[in-house]
Image: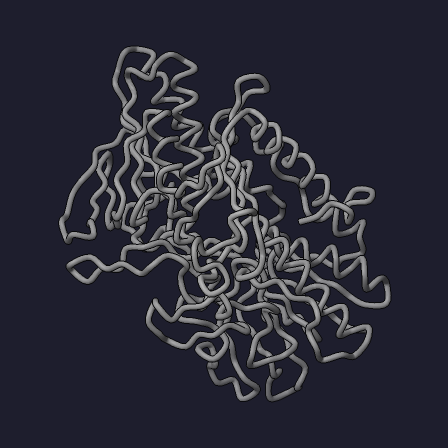
Amino acid sequence: MAKVLILGAGISGHTAALIAKRKLGKNHQVTVVSPNSNYQWIPSNIWVGMGLMTPEQVKFELAPVYKRQGISYKQALAVSLHPEGDTKSTTPYVKIKHIVGTQKDTEENIEYDYLINATGPKLNFAATQGLGPEGFTDSVCTFQHAAEAWHNLQKNLAKMEKGERQTFLIGTGHPMATCQGAAFEYSLNIAFEVKKRKLDHLADIVWISNEYELGDFGMGGAYVKRGGYITPTKIFSESVFSEYGIRWITGAGVNKVEEGLVHYETLDGEYHTQQFDFAMLIPGFAGAGMKAYNKHDEDITPTVFAPNGFMKVDADYTVKPYEEWKASDWPSTYQCPAYDNVYAAGIAFAPPHAMSKPMQSKNGTFIYPTPPRTGMPSGVIGRVVAENVVAKIKTGTKENKHKASMGKMGAACIVSAGYGIIDGQAAVMTVNPIVPDWEKYPQWGRNIDDTVGVIGLAGHWMKLFMHYMFLYKAKALPLWWMIPE
């Protein structure tokens, strides 16, 4: 009996667990370790943050689903990786710490034959002084954060109802944060809600981002087909923001937050402040913080993990100039080069480099987005990693036949721009590939026939449909495996 251990139960880890168990059956063991008791459909947290959905509508308990599927589940935190075992045994294991129940704070070693690290990101609020729910800004990164954001946002809306002008600051809260798309989406929903209440004359909505220009989204921007014309995402995004009455600050690295005041540095080396009454700023991401040790109990963390805490995989991490970066630098199997029975899926893998051009302020501060790896790419990677592990167990092959390079993979993103069956809107963007390939597509960096951008009511219906469809799939309800990632 083979033992497959999966760390994390987000989009990538949960996908990998369901697929691995379905294909391996009862003869092999699949175990999931996650500090979270719930699965959450993160793309809908935006609606929780606007009071349009409750947390219960975007989450469900993991334990009943895993029990029904025959998957072992432990609500615990992965502490350290021991891929060679230790002085007592050569069997690899992960040390975990239980965080609930009678075993709380106790440690346990979970042995494995194959490990899938899908721990996702650590929300690194601490990297920016005063950032986050424990500081002076809100977040929509979890359903709990989103619910709190809505609680606080209502206070600002109530003040507007009394005639008080309010400033809403939305964007990124660290010079190298990612997930601009989520913040972009939230800013549009605030603008939509304010206008629906006929309070837009009292609202100043400000976008602040580390992007060199609007529409970069951490993927170096894109050229999209829109209305029969080829348009840069810069123009696309600027037109949407102009329509929604949002002004923008780009090339800005937020370095400190005080009550009602953000401090930031711009690429020209200048330091500025921006007042706010309500702020939702995305933090920087870091790895989960696991350590790795060899059989002699020597620290090999730098061998297995990059400095940012994400796991090294089959990517080209050679340090080279931006002009020499290639789509082929990106991983395709997500196998750890140091240990061939270890994989990293979703956000847990270390990117070889950014997609956006690295920018430094005149003071030497790096101000640019790190690569986004959320949503659809995470699900696809989770599936591919699980399929390779299953093939190895069933056939004994050492080859990874299933591949999913972000340099070859397409993706679709639906950005809510206002909730409503009749008057809702969403911007639909597709790119192929995700990582621009200037060798294959020298004119646009991507296949222009597969890269489009439109906004309208149909997009809102599509996002709403996907909310229910993907929750259905994640709950492993009948024929769930027929729904694509």
- Residue 396 figure quarter: bottom right
Question: Which quadrant holds residue 130?
Answer: top left
Residue 245 drawn above or below residue 23: above
Q: Is residue 209 above or below residue 192?
A: below
Q: Is residue 77 left or right of residue 124?
A: right
Q: Name the spot of residue 158 as percent of width and height, x first.
A: 36, 16
Q: Residue furthest left?
A: 270
Residue 106 visible to the viewer: no
Q: In the rendered view, tell whether residue 285 sits above or below residue 206.
A: below
Q: Residue at x 42, y 55 (%)?
A: 285
Q: Quadrant of the N terminus?
A: bottom right
Horizontally, residue 466 falls left or right of residue 149, namely right
Q: Residue at the spot x=52%, y=46% of the render?
A: 451
Which residue is rendered at x = 78% and y = 73% of the image?
A: 393
Q: Nearer the viewer, residue 243 or 336?
A: 243
Residue 438 visible somewhere in the drawing:
yes
| Residue sitting nearer the eye, 164 or 375 | 375
| Rendered image quadrant of residue 96 | bottom right
412 relative to 401 in the view: left or right:
left
Where residue 227 sits: x, y (%)?
Answer: 48, 32
Image spot of residue 149 (x, y percent): 42, 32
